[in-house]
């Protein structure tokens, strides 16, 4: 029988036995997130409040253990994985919506609040929380803040960074600080902007004051069906070039349709090469005028059809097809590797051509479903990790795709973060001086060397082999090549 370490015993003393997970069989579920990466924590601690978080960090520091913050584990860059073992601090118990101020359009929440739950609570007050990742039924506000999450409806409203006014932050030395203000125009440095998107490397958010927005009085959701991905891509550029900023502008390709339609019956034609989901919202007169203009633009690129949802139920059904796409891919292959690159909208046709060419060359099915309006691509490479060499092939293909995005004038992430997955790609877009400046900023928040280590920056001391290939292969070796891991 496994004997608890001194670290485990001290954590138990601080927050109780029921809030500490340390047996090997229980730790297994914390080795994963939404990527193909793996990380092996030594112990999981589940705090109930800010004081608990502070105490846990101090205990970890005393024992020289690394600290990794974790939300729902839906992340897609390995940010919540324990790259150097140590303590994972899981925020799942801190899930209260503390207050909603409808007059000032703000909400004060704990980090474990599920994104959709905040949206539903805001809806009761005639408001909305704009960032809506496809994982919003599971992902949490703390994780959204860490990764600067986006979603289909952030085209017009912006990503998480545009909706966080202030945070309570426990730094790497266990100190508790409030950063930010209840207005957006506080003078001085934008420290909240430094925390949002920092991927848990500068501290743990224990409360967040977020901005809510008015719910639109009218919405029009259109589905445009194309027989060419290039035509659909050109239609995207034309819509945005017209001066209209839709609430959402999404693309789904043929492989994705083939996975989604049999499961959800959304009405996406199985023989279409691509469909666009376009949504405009606002006052009824504005929606009527902009909807007509958008439809006219979409028709210039020879769609098979353009139709509008006739009621709320049909609109939700169309969006279910987009947001349920990742889960539906499991009926094609047991594993997927979801990429996250950004390119200029005008480069979408050429970049997508390159994505399909790379996938074909590596003998990998690829499904594309992405935020076309802001050029945020999400190619999804499908594979079976039990097949010898499949994981290495996927990683090589993924690297080539990310290089194409950068060469097109884009970036290596739009909303999933850098994490473990893309840390070795950072020099593609930043100089050594840039990275040194970012590391100096991180150090200004405290002794962060053991705080979510091995994330964002290229591999350093004690971080093992580069990227996630080491983690995935390590686990396949552990369980056997024919095991699902």
Image (cartoon, rainbow, N blue to C red):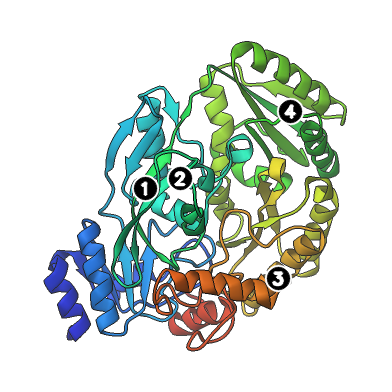
Tell me the mark number nearer the camera, choosing from 3 and 1. Answer: 1
Circle 3 residue: 399
Question: Quarter holding the N terminus?
Answer: bottom left
Q: CA distance from mark 2 to mark 3?
A: 32 Å
Q: Residues within 10 Å of mark 3 (few under 14, many from 20)?
A: some
Q: Between residues 377 and 313, which one lies in front from this camera angle?
A: 377
Q: In this image, 484 relative to 14: left or right?
A: right
Q: CA distance from mark 4 to mark 2?
A: 26 Å
Which mark is on residue 164? 2
Tell me the mark number nearer the camera, choosing from 2 and 3. Answer: 2
Element type where label 4 sits in the image: loop
First in sequence: mark 4 or mark 2? 2
User: What residue appears at the point 73 percent right and 45 percent down from the top-left corner?
Assistant: 254
First in sequence: mark 2 or mark 1? 2
Judge whether residue 112 can be spotted in this image.
yes
Question: Circles 3 and 1: CB distance less than 8 Å?
Answer: no
Q: Residues within 10 Å of mark 4 (few under 14, many from 20)?
A: some
Q: Between residues 467 and 434, which one lies in front from this camera angle?
A: 434
User: What residue appears at the point 62 percent right and 73 percent down from the top-left corner?
Assistant: 435
Q: Where residue 485 sits in the image (x, y, percent)?
A: 46, 71
Circle 4 residue: 244
First in sequence: mark 4 or mark 1? 1
Circle 1 residue: 208
Instruction: Relative to 346, say whether 459 is above or below.
Output: below
Element type where label 3 sits in the image: helix
Q: Quadrant of residue 334?
A: bottom right
Q: Residues within 10 Å of mark 1 (few under 14, many from 20)?
A: many
Instruction: Relative to 27, say whether 381 is above or below.
Output: above
Tell me the mark number nearer the camera, choosing from 4 and 3. Answer: 4
Q: Quadrant of residue 448?
A: bottom left
Q: In this image, 359 relative to 217: left or right?
A: right
Element type where label 2 sits in the image: strand
């Amino acid at each position: 029988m496994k004997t608890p370490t001194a670290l485990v015993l001290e954590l138990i003393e601080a927050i109780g036995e029921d809030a500490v997970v340390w047996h090997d069989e229980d730790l297994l579920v914390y080795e994963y997130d939404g990527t193909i990466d793996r990380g092996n924590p030594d112990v999981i601690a589940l705090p109930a409040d800010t004081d608990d978080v502070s105490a846990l960090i101090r205990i970890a520091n005393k024992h020289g253990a690394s600290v990794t913050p974790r939300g729902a584990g839906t992340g897609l860059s390995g940010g919540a994985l324990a790259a150097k073992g140590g303590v994972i601090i899981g925020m799942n118990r801190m899930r209260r919506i503390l207050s909603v101020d409808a007059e000032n359009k703000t909400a004060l929440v704990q980090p474990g609040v599920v994104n959709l739950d905040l949206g539903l609570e805001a809806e009761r007050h005639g408001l909305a929380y704009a960032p809506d990742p496809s994982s919003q039924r599971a992902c949490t506000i703390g994780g959204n803040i860490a990764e600067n999450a986006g979603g289909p409806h952030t085209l017009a409203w912006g990503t998480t960074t545009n909706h966080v006014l202030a945070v309570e932050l426990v730094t790497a030395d266990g100190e508790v600080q409030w950063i930010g203000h209840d207005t957006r125009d506080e003078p001085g440095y934008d420290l909240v902007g430094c925390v949002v998107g920092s991927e848990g490397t500068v501290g743990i958010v224990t409360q967040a004051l977020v901005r809510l927005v008015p719910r639109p009085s009218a919405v029009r959701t259109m589905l445009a069906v194309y027989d060419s991905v290039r035509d659909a891509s050109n239609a995207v550029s034309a819509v945005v070039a017209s001066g209209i900023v839709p609430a959402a502008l999404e693309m789904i390709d043929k492989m994705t349709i083939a996975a989604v339609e049999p499961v959800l019956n959304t009405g996406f034609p199985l023989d279409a090469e691509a469909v666009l989901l376009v949504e405009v919202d606002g006052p009824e007169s504005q929606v009527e005028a902009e909807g007509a203009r958008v439809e006219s633009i979409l028709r210039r690129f020879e769609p098979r059809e353009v139709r509008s949802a006739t009621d709320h139920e049909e609109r939700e059904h169309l969006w279910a097809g987009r947001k349920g796409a990742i889960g539906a891919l499991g009926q094609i292959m047991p594993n997927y590797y979801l990429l996250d690159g950004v390119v200029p909208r005008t480069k979408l046709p050429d970049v997508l051509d390159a994505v399909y060419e790379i996938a074909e060359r590596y003998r990998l099915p690829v499904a594309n479903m992405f935020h076309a309006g802001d050029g945020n691509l999400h190619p999804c490479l499908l594979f079976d990790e039990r097949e010898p060499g499949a994981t290495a092939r996927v990683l090589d293909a993924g690297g080539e795709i990310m290089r194409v995005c950068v060469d097109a004038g884009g970036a290596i992430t739009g909303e999933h973060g850098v994490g473990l997955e893309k840390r070795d790609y950072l020099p593609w877009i930043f100089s050594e001086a840039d990275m040194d400046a970012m590391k100096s900023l991180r150090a200004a928040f405290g002794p962060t060397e053991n705080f979510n280590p091995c994330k964002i920056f290229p591999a350093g001391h004690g971080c093992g082999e580069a990227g996630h290939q080491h983690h995935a292969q390590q686990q396949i070796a552990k369980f056997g090549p024919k095991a699902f891991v």
